[in-house]
Every structure is written in structure tokens, then in C-alpha cells.
Image (cartoon, rainbow, N blue to C red):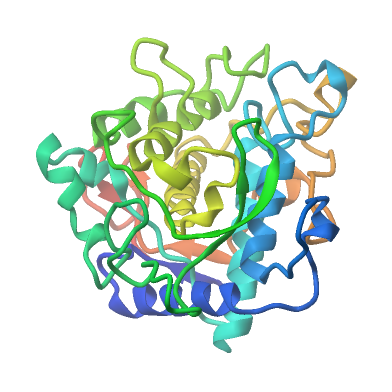
Amino acid sequence: MAVVRRNILHDAASRDLYIRGVRLLKAEFLGPTTADLGIGGQQQQVSTYDLFVAWHHIAMNTFTPPSQGDRNAAHRGPVFLPWHRFMLVLLELQLQRVLDDENFGLPYWDWSSDGDLPVAQQPDAPLWAGDVLGGQGDPVTTGPFAFDPSDPDSWRVLIDTDVQGRLRGTNRGLRRQFAANAPDLPTNADVDAALDLDAYDRSPWSTTSNGFRNRLEGWRPLNTAPGLHNRVHVWVGGDMLPSSSPNDPVFYLNHCNVDRIWASWQVRYPESAYVPTGTASAALTGHRVDDAMFSLLSTPATPRQMLDVGDVYEYDALFVTAEPAGVGAGGLGAVRTV
């Protein structure tokens, strides 16, 4: 039976289980070390949670083949959405395991609702309360991911990236700096504009493409970039900026909402296929529909395997721009409930 992914601010049980689960994964050390990840210096074990951080970083720095240009194994090209969907599914399975709850579904942060708030209110939105994710700081000192140097059980960043973009070992608190690099969050109107695009992606399959994937990833339109997904990373700031951004648990709430927007697009355009296909140039290896996606943590999946995951999870509500069965007309904001 499919699990249900719910709005973290509307479901206290999902919120509390998510916080407990990521803390359990952060405290689980099953053997892998920094040496296994190619990190020099003093060696230390890394947690199950930290393996996801490393996977994301390495994917961002993997280019196959060299002709990819600015595309990497998980971003700046068509595979962006299915790769992160795969990552979310694997994290969800790990959380179900440590929580001993096969019905747990990852929650999402509906950041476009916060983006519709006045700019001055966005840093004080409910997500950042002490009983949800805590607030900003260097380090963060409120909420379940606060840092206390005297408490070995407080949330600690154990691997991050240096100024050259290399993975390294560390031991410090989480960092957030709201609105320092982007003044506000994306809005519902921004989501609506992305959902109006009926083509999944287009040549040249990069940050310059005109299509839904590139708009949702946040490289277009140029006059408002960064947008959507990218803008959330930039607005939160701190540890959400570099390739080690999964260090902040808000990373997964952001990507779960990105995935929810993609799921909404799939409902609106059921005949719009994932592209590129297997007949596309070998220069697009890793981004074609039947290519194996880069993975450190599992047998690789393909984008095709991520296109229909209705038997794995569903969302409590989707953005839709056409009237679904059983829901009144209403444009963006009309929802399909489960």
C-alpha cells in the first residue's frame, strides 16, 4: 500500500516522526568511514544520514561523459527530477526502517505558501519554530537540530565541502542564513508558471533549456533566477548552499515539495513523455530515460522506473490546473486529495 506524504505544518505526527527519524539516522554508525568516501585527514565513521550527504555531493561532481558540459549526474539536466525522486524513496525507506513504521511518508514544506507571505514575515514562518526545524544562525541554536558544543548528541555536521568544493571531515553546528542571498521565497504564481509548460525538457538539455524541468530546477527565466528549487536553497542559505546541502534536514522537505510539483505536472500532462529517449546522443548518458542513474547507496534505478511510483507513495494534495474528479474548479490551488 502506498504511503501518504503530508504537509509538515498540517500533520504533527509526520513532523515528529520525521524529526525523530533523521536524528536516528544521524546517530547510526554502521561502519563506513571518511576513508571510504575518499576524504583524507583524521579518519572517522560517518552516519547513515551522512552517506546521503556524500552521495549528493559526489553526484554533483560526477560528469559522464566529459562532454556533458554543465550537466552533472543529478542536476542541470533532465535527470534532475527522477534522480532526486530516487533519493527521496531511499531516504523514506531508511526512515521507515529506523522508525519501525512502514506507513511513514516523508513530509513536504509548501514553500510557495510561505513565499506568498510579506517578505518580512518569511523568516518567522511556522516551519522555523522551535518545535519544527528551528531557526537560523551560525550555528543554529533552536529546535531539534540545534548545536551545543557540550552535548555530543546535538546535531553535528560531520562532512561538508571546502571552498574548492571538495568533501572534507568536520565537526560543527548547522548553519542557516535566511534571505542573505535571495530576498524572498518562490510564490504560488511562480509554481503556476512552471506548471503551464507542457514539455518536460528541451534541447540543449541544460541550464539554458526551455521546459518544465529547467523552470522547476530554477535556472529559468533568467530575469528572476534563481527560481523555485534553486531559490529555496539560496534563500535558506548556510549549509543549503553547497553540494553538501543534505546536511540540513530542510533539504528533503524542499525536494519533497519539488517532487510534489512534478507529480502535479504529471497529472496535468499525462501524455507528455520524459525526454530524452534512449535514441538521444551518447553525450546525454545518465540523462536518457533508460540510463542507470548514479548511486552510491543502492542498485541504480533508471528515470523510467521513477515515472510511475503510485504504488510507493502519494501526496495528500497536489497542485492542479485542470479540474480533477471530485474537486471543484479553481485553477492553481485546486487540489486532488487522497
x and y, in percent, of residue 163 in the image: 59, 32
- Judging depth in this view, the residue of 54 and 148 nearest the camera is 148
x and y, in percent, of residue 164 in the image: 65, 30
Name the residue: 22% across, 45% down.
113
Figure check: 144 above or below 67: below
Figure check: 26 above or below 280: below
Q: Residue furthest bottom?
A: 100
Name the residue: 26% across, 36% down.
188
x and y, in percent, of residue 227 in the image: 39, 27
Q: Is residue 113 visible?
A: yes
Name the residue: 69% across, 45% down.
167
- Judging depth in this view, the residue of 90 and 126 nearest the camera is 126
Say which quadrant the C terminus sits in. Answer: bottom left
- Give the number of marks: 0
Residue 5 located left or right of residue 7: right
- Judging depth in this view, the residue of 214 and 40 nearest the camera is 40
x and y, in percent, of residue 232 in the image: 38, 39
Residue 56 located left or right of residue 286: left
Name the residue: 59% across, 31% down.
272
Say which quadrant the N terminus sits in. Answer: bottom right
Q: Quadrant of residue 223?
A: top left
Residue 100 located left or right of residue 168: left
Q: Is residue 311 visible?
A: no
- Judging depth in this view, the residue of 137 and 230 nearest the camera is 137
Figure check: 276 above or below 33: above
